[in-house]
Image: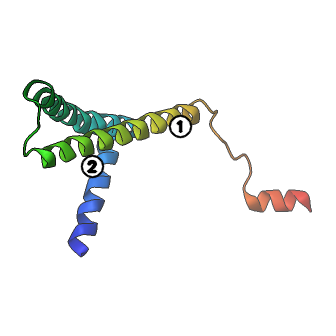
Amino acid sequence: MRAFSAALDLVVVLALLQGHSRPGILFLKWGLVSALPGSVILAFIAYLRIFEGSIQHRFPLLALGVMLVLAGLQLLLAGVMAEWMGAKERSRPAYRVDRSRQETREHQQ
């Protein structure tokens, strides 16, 4: 179990290092990497169904294609949302603190 959490931490650190200040780009890339093979698989299954009349014994391949496309769409949407939220955050002016809490308390008294 400890190895799983360490591997997850490594993935997070690598994602942060590659994404720099744009976390949505990473999600968009992985979404495309996932959705494109899924689309190819589903196109192959559709070809078999249309031209041969049956997909025969390829039901697990159909499930894999659907799973990859759905996972890709979810990652793409997460990337779009992250980019949208990041752009909203980047458009805000920088927040500056002019006084410390101690100075504020002294000033109020």
| Residue 72 location, quadrant | top left
Q: Which mark is residue 14?
A: 2
| The N terminus, quarter of image | bottom left
Q: Which residue is mark 1?
A: 85
State the image coordinates of residue 69 (x, y, percent, origin top left). 28, 38
- Mark 1: few/some/many CA within 10 Å (<14, 14-19, 20+): few
Residue 11, image x, y percentages: 26, 54
Residue 91 left/right relative to 34: right
Q: Mark 2 Cα within 10 Å, few/some/many (few <14, many 20+)?
A: few
Instruction: Using residue 56 as the reference point, say whether residue 30 is left or right of it.
Output: right
Q: Is residue 57 left or right of residue 84?
A: left
- Could you tell me which residue is drawn at 67 percent across and 42 percent down? 96
Residue 43 visible, this orientation: yes
Give percent across and percent down for residue 78: 42, 41
Q: Camera-side residue: 29 or 42?
A: 42
Amino acid type, callout 1:
Met
Would residue 21 be visible to someone looking at this image? no
Give the answer, above or below, for where 45 lies relative to 10: above
The span from disc 2 to disc 1 (Cα, nearest Å) is: 21 Å
The residue positioned 44% from the left and 33% from the top of the image is 80
* Three-letter residue code for mark 2: Leu
Residue 76, given in percent of the width and then of the height, sits at 37, 36
**Whether label 2 touches label 1, CB < 8 Å:** no
Residue at image position (31%, 47%) is 15
Q: Secondary structure at mark 2?
A: helix
Determine the image quadrant of residue 93. top right
Q: Quadrant of residue 75?
A: top left
Mark closer to the observer (2, 1): 1
